[in-house]
Amino acid sequence: MWLQRIDAKIADLQKREVEQEQGRKNRPQEPDWIVELGIGNGRPPTEVHVGGCYAAGKRQRPVPRDEARRLLTSGVCACTHCKPDAQLRILD
Protein backbone atom coordinates (compact mmCIF):
# COMPACT_ATOMS: atom_id res chain seq x y z
CA MET A 1 0.00 0.00 0.00
CA TRP A 2 2.78 2.44 0.89
CA LEU A 3 4.72 1.49 -2.19
CA GLN A 4 1.72 2.41 -4.37
CA ARG A 5 1.46 5.83 -2.71
CA ILE A 6 5.17 6.49 -3.13
CA ASP A 7 5.09 5.42 -6.78
CA ALA A 8 2.04 7.61 -7.42
CA LYS A 9 3.74 10.62 -5.78
CA ILE A 10 6.91 10.09 -7.85
CA ALA A 11 4.83 9.86 -11.03
CA ASP A 12 2.98 13.09 -10.12
CA LEU A 13 6.25 14.93 -9.47
CA GLN A 14 7.74 13.73 -12.76
CA LYS A 15 4.62 14.81 -14.64
CA ARG A 16 4.74 18.26 -13.00
CA GLU A 17 8.42 18.62 -13.91
CA VAL A 18 7.71 17.76 -17.57
CA GLU A 19 4.84 20.29 -17.66
CA GLN A 20 7.05 23.01 -16.17
CA GLU A 21 9.75 22.35 -18.75
CA GLN A 22 7.20 22.55 -21.58
CA GLY A 23 5.97 25.84 -20.12
CA ARG A 24 9.50 27.25 -20.12
CA LYS A 25 10.01 26.21 -23.75
CA ASN A 26 6.65 27.64 -24.91
CA ARG A 27 6.97 30.95 -23.06
CA PRO A 28 7.16 33.90 -25.46
CA GLN A 29 10.51 35.61 -25.71
CA GLU A 30 10.97 38.63 -23.47
CA PRO A 31 10.98 41.94 -25.41
CA ASP A 32 14.15 44.03 -25.43
CA TRP A 33 12.34 47.28 -24.58
CA ILE A 34 8.96 48.07 -23.03
CA VAL A 35 7.06 51.26 -22.47
CA GLU A 36 4.86 51.73 -19.44
CA LEU A 37 1.53 53.34 -20.28
CA GLY A 38 -0.41 55.87 -18.26
CA ILE A 39 -4.05 55.89 -17.27
CA GLY A 40 -6.75 57.76 -19.09
CA ASN A 41 -7.54 59.03 -22.53
CA GLY A 42 -5.05 57.71 -25.07
CA ARG A 43 -2.91 56.01 -22.41
CA PRO A 44 0.19 58.14 -22.96
CA PRO A 45 3.62 56.57 -22.42
CA THR A 46 5.05 57.40 -19.00
CA GLU A 47 8.32 55.49 -18.70
CA VAL A 48 10.66 53.38 -20.84
CA HIS A 49 12.12 50.14 -19.42
CA VAL A 50 14.50 47.39 -20.48
CA GLY A 51 12.51 44.22 -21.12
CA GLY A 52 12.06 42.23 -17.92
CA CYS A 53 12.55 45.18 -15.58
CA TYR A 54 11.04 44.37 -12.20
CA ALA A 55 9.94 47.99 -11.72
CA ALA A 56 7.70 48.09 -14.81
CA GLY A 57 4.01 48.39 -14.08
CA LYS A 58 1.22 46.23 -15.40
CA ARG A 59 0.17 48.59 -18.19
CA GLN A 60 2.94 48.10 -20.72
CA ARG A 61 3.65 47.16 -24.30
CA PRO A 62 6.78 46.04 -26.11
CA VAL A 63 8.48 48.54 -28.40
CA PRO A 64 11.34 48.21 -30.90
CA ARG A 65 14.71 49.83 -30.21
CA ASP A 66 14.08 52.81 -32.50
CA GLU A 67 10.79 53.68 -30.82
CA ALA A 68 12.38 53.39 -27.37
CA ARG A 69 15.09 55.83 -28.46
CA ARG A 70 12.50 58.18 -29.95
CA LEU A 71 10.40 58.13 -26.78
CA LEU A 72 13.40 58.85 -24.57
CA THR A 73 14.57 61.75 -26.73
CA SER A 74 11.05 63.20 -26.83
CA GLY A 75 10.93 63.54 -23.05
CA VAL A 76 9.47 60.28 -21.75
CA CYS A 77 11.22 59.33 -18.50
CA ALA A 78 13.73 56.51 -18.33
CA CYS A 79 13.41 53.95 -15.54
CA THR A 80 15.88 54.71 -12.74
CA HIS A 81 16.28 51.01 -11.95
CA CYS A 82 17.12 49.45 -15.33
CA LYS A 83 18.46 52.65 -16.98
CA PRO A 84 17.41 52.13 -20.62
CA ASP A 85 18.89 55.51 -21.60
CA ALA A 86 22.38 54.31 -20.66
CA GLN A 87 21.92 51.04 -22.56
CA LEU A 88 20.66 52.94 -25.61
CA ARG A 89 23.54 55.41 -25.20
CA ILE A 90 21.36 58.48 -24.94
CA LEU A 91 23.01 61.37 -23.13
CA ASP A 92 21.05 64.00 -21.19
Image: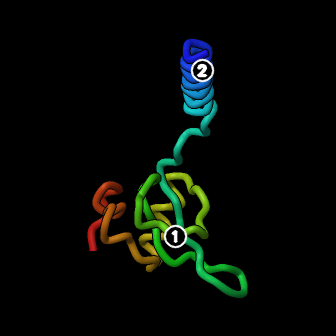
**Label placed on residue 57:** 1
Type of the residue with mark 2: Arg
**Label placed on residue 76:** none
Q: CA distance from mark 1 to mark 2?
A: 44 Å
Extreme front residue here?
1
Q: Quadrant of the N terminus?
A: top right
Q: Residue at x 71, y 81 (%)?
A: 42
Extreme right residue here?
41
* Rendered view: 35 above or below 26: below
Q: Earlier in the sequence, mark 1 or mark 2?
A: 2
To which quarter of the image does residue 12 belong? top right
Mark 2: which secondary structure?
A: helix
Q: Mark 1: few, some, or many residues within 10 Å (few <14, many ≥20)?
A: few
Mark 1: which secondary structure?
A: loop
**Residue 3: x percent and y percent?**
56, 12
Reading the image, the residue beneath label 2 is 5
To which quarter of the image does residue 5 belong? top right
Q: Mark 2: few, some, or many residues within 10 Å (few <14, many ≥20)?
A: few
Q: Residue at x 41, y 58 (%)?
A: 53
Position of 39 compared to 66: left or right?
right
Type of the residue with mark 1: Gly
**Residue 69: x percent and y percent?**
45, 62
Position of 52 compared to 22: left or right?
left
**Residue 36: x percent and y percent?**
54, 70
* Rendered view: 5 above or below 52: above
Which residue is nearer to you in this view: 12 or 17?
12
Q: Quadrant of the C terminus?
A: bottom left
* Rendered view: 23 above or below 44: above
Extreme bottom residue here?
40
